[in-house]
Image (cartoon, rainbow, N blue to C red):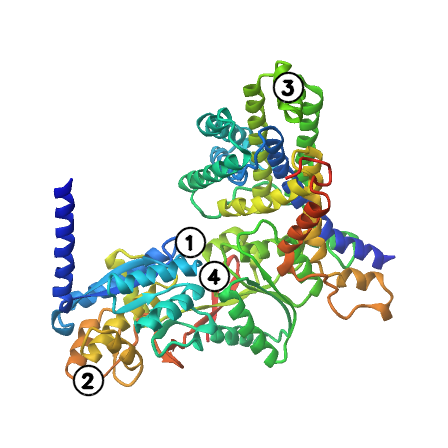
């Protein structure tokens, strides 16, 4: 029985909890990508750097608040700074839309052109973020670091395995749930949300029934800015803020959105968790868990690792390939790529 | 417009012939470092130190009948071999450099060596490429380094573990030439001492999440985790994630993990962890620090001493060979760097030139106690440290 508990705890500590937190961060990022794809009809490569920009504003405001002595007690101050970051990111994307994307929209440019344009925008965002805050690692997390630490857990339960839950992991999960619930309520129950879905389903029909396209586009960008900043800030709190990692996040985020089905919000969430769990689960060395579960004579001598961690990224791409081959519209029947 | 073009062309021609005429008195030295890319925060100080040595040469007034050495900078990018090769090619073909101070990161250094230096017969002295692979690279006697090979660091790290009686460790390294080379050399020394490596897992820098690596490493177990990465990159992410999940609470760190920022961020959690970093101490190091301060260069930054020594060795070798040519550098670097001869410290290059001009011998000590072994690489001294109370504490030098 104790062995069974130890196995469960080890599994949660090294697989379930980290993958849940990582999955939520990916899901929030993928939601933004999927909304843009559904409504504006292009893959927004600048999304990772939108996250970096929003998070940068949050970091700067957090520092100002910390300097002014404002804090949230055990919660990170960054949560207070979040609205400012969202405003900053919203201003940036609306400005970009006005200056860049609208031009191409009026030309009815092909999606592939918009993709290239978004790459250009990505490089500009990249530069702006580095100009303002620099390319280095920045820490802005404060408050309690752990809900429960590995050593405390061992002392508390007397088990051999420790279980650590970081407060940032808990905050990530809770915030993700709240944000997703709000988003779905908005899309399904408000007039603007419904007009967005209508616009996404059939642009011409939506225009005929009197939906103002510019308004839909603006609201989309606002939501995307909010999602990007929240995802970026949660990620930064959990790890640390470095502009380059946000650029790198783009890959798993797109993988999540495509696996789930581009354009499908539900799919983006599922995709985020599929990618996170497969990255961690397939490369996990199961020896520790199996040693607890199996009788002594069956204990594995090797590590029981399906794939070495070198192949972590290959895992996401293999899943991506399989999905594209077998079910090009993704798990949740989004648009085919 | 036509006139302007003509004028420009004329100017260019004049400049070209001027360079050719004054070739006897001004000689270009390439300084190829990653001014953009992962180590862009270190390279300005490294280049500054190298150029400080060249200035000292020029101001000595005793160098080869008034030859002036002019540094020409180029960007190695640290990671992009094609870009580094192109930059080095430009140095050799259009700037006509006779020797190269660089490159910095091991991967691009190997590329520049085999694609540019060897075909053109231009010697290079790298201040910071530490991959063991470069020891056996085909260099026609053109490649030297003032930084020790990681083969030596691997032995040092294994030696520390042997002294502490630790026999079972998990290893993670940054997935590039440096990390792979260091982990291979560490593991072979460690296993030769009778140790067991439970798992040797690479990690990528700048990635979003290291839970997968930590999960596997924790499952493999071991008395501690050996982290051979970068303190501001994946190495830090790995340590952070191990501490958070309670996977490991003791670490041994390679030289790339040495950094004050790491302690500032992780602080007391690292207490009891230890590692090694190339270090130099003594008169030469102090003199270099004073010179750097006077010249307004941050001499405390990584690899600045090695950079100064690399540039100084180029000039000394030219003097020993009696001419500012590639051949003179390649043939004389090891002679001037090693005993026998008068010991030469930083700031004493003028004195060294006089000795060489009179047919004497020198043993360049420089800022890092230069001693070139094997095919021309620094032997290196390492500082073994432990983290105590959130600060680095020297245990001993190895």
From the image, state whether disc 4 or disc 1 is nearer to you.
Answer: 1
Q: Chain of mark 4?
A: B
Circles 3 and 2: CB distance less than 8 Å?
Answer: no
Q: Is residue A47 above or below residue A212?
A: below
Cα distance in 3D space between marks 2 and 1? 43 Å
For label 2, the crowd category at 10 Å Cα-Cα, with few meaning under 14, some 14 to 19 and many 20 or more, is few
Q: Earlier in the sequence, mark 2 or mark 1?
A: 1
Q: Which mark is residue B360?
A: 2
Q: Quadrant of residue B300?
A: bottom left
Cα distance in 3D space between marks 1 and 3? 48 Å
Q: Which x, y percent locates residue B256?
A: 48, 62
Q: Residue at x 63, y 41 (%)?
A: A25
Q: Which residue position is annotated with label 4?
A: B258
Q: Which residue position is annotated with label 1?
A: B37
Q: Earlier in the sequence, mark 4 or mark 1?
A: 1
Q: Which x, y percent locates residue B325?
A: 22, 74
Residue at mark 4 shares a chain with residue at mark 1: yes
Circles 2 and 1: CB distance less than 8 Å?
Answer: no
């Amino acid at each position: 029985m104790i062995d069974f508990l130890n196995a469960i705890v080890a599994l949660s500590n090294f697989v379930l909890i980290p993958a849940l937190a990582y999955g939520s961060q990916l899901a929030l990022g993928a939601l933004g990508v999927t909304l843009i794809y559904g409504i504006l009809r292009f893959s927004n490569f600048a999304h990772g750097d939108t996250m970096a920009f929003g998070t940068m504003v949050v970091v700067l405001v957090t520092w100002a608040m910390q300097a002014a002595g404002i804090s949230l007690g055990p919660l990170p101050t960054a949560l207070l700074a979040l609205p400012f970051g969202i405003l900053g990111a919203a201003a940036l994307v609306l400005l970009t839309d006005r200056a860049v994307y609208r031009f191409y929209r009026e030309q009815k440019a092909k999606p592939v052109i918009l993709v290239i344009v978004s790459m250009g925008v990505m490089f500009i965002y990249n530069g702006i973020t580095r100009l303002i805050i620099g390319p280095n690692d920045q820490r802005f997390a404060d408050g309690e670091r752990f809900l429960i630490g590995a050593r405390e857990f061992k002392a508390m339960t007397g088990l051999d395995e420790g279980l650590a839950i970081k407060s940032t992991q808990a905050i990530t999960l809770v915030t993700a749930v709240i944000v997703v619930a709000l988003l779905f309520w908005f899309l399904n129950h408000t007039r603007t949300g419904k007009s967005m879905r209508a616009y996404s389903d059939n642009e011409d029909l939506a225009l005929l029934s009197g939906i103002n396209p510019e308004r839909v586009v603006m609201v989309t960008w606002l939501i995307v800015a909010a999602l990007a900043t929240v995802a970026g800030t949660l990620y930064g709190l959990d790890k640390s803020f470095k502009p380059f990692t946000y650029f790198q996040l783009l890959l798993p985020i797109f993988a999540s959105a495509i696996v789930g089905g581009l354009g499908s919000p539900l799919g983006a969430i599922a995709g985020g968790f599929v990618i996170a769990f497969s990255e961690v689960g397939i490369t996990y060395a199961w020896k520790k868990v199996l040693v607890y579960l199996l009788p002594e004579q069956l204990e594995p001598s090797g590590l029981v690792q399906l794939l070495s961690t070198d192949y972590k990224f290959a895992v996401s791409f293999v899943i991506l390939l399989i999905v594209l081959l077998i079910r090009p519209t993704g798990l949740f029947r989004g648009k085919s790529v | 417009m036509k006139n302007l073009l003509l004028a420009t062309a004329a100017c260019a021609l004049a400049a070209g012939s001027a360079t050719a005429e004054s070739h006897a008195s001004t000689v270009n030295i390439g300084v190829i470092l990653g001014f953009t890319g992962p180590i862009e925060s270190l390279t300005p100080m490294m280049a500054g130190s190298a150029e400080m040595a060249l200035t000292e040469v020029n101001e000595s007034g005793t160098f080869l009948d008034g030859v002036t050495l002019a540094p020409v900078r180029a960007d190695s990018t640290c990671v992009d071999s094609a870009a580094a090769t192109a930059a080095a090619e430009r140095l050799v073909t259009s700037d006509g450099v006779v020797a190269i101070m660089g490159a910095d990161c091991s991967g691009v250094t190997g590329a520049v060596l085999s694609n540019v230096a060897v075909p053109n017969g231009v010697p290079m002295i790298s201040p910071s490429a530490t991959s063991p692979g470069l020891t056996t690279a085909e260099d026609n006697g053109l490649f030297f380094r003032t930084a020790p090979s990681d083969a030596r660091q691997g032995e040092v790290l294994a030696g520390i573990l042997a002294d502490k009686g630790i026999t079972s460790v998990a290893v993670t390294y940054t997935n590039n030439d440096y990390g792979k080379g260091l982990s291979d050399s560490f593991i072979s020394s460690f296993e030769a001492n009778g140790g067991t490596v439970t798992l040797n897992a690479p990690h990528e820098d700048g990635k979003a999440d290291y839970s997968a690596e930590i999960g596997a490493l924790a499952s493999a177990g071991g008395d501690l985790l050996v982290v051979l990465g970068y303190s501001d990159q994946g190495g830090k992410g790995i340590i952070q994630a191990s501490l958070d999940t309670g996977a490991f609470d003791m670490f041994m760190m390679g030289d790339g993990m040495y950094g004050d920022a790491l302690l500032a961020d992780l602080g007391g959690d690292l207490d009891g962890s230890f590692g090694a970093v190339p270090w130099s101490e003594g008169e030469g190091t102090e003199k270099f620090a004073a010179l750097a301060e006077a010249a307004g260069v941050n001499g405390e930054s990584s690899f600045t001493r090695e950079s100064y020594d690399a540039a100084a060795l180029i000039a000394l070798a030219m003097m020993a060979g009696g001419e500012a040519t590639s051949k003179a550098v390649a043939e004389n670097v090891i002679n001037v760097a090693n005993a026998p001869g008068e010991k030469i410290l930083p700031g004493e290059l003028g004195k060294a030139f006089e000795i060489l001009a009179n047919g004497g011998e020198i043993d360049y000590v420089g800022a890092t106690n230069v001693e070139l072994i094997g095919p021309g690489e620094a032997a290196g001294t390492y500082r073994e440290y432990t983290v105590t109370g959130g600060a680095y504490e020297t245990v001993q030098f190895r």
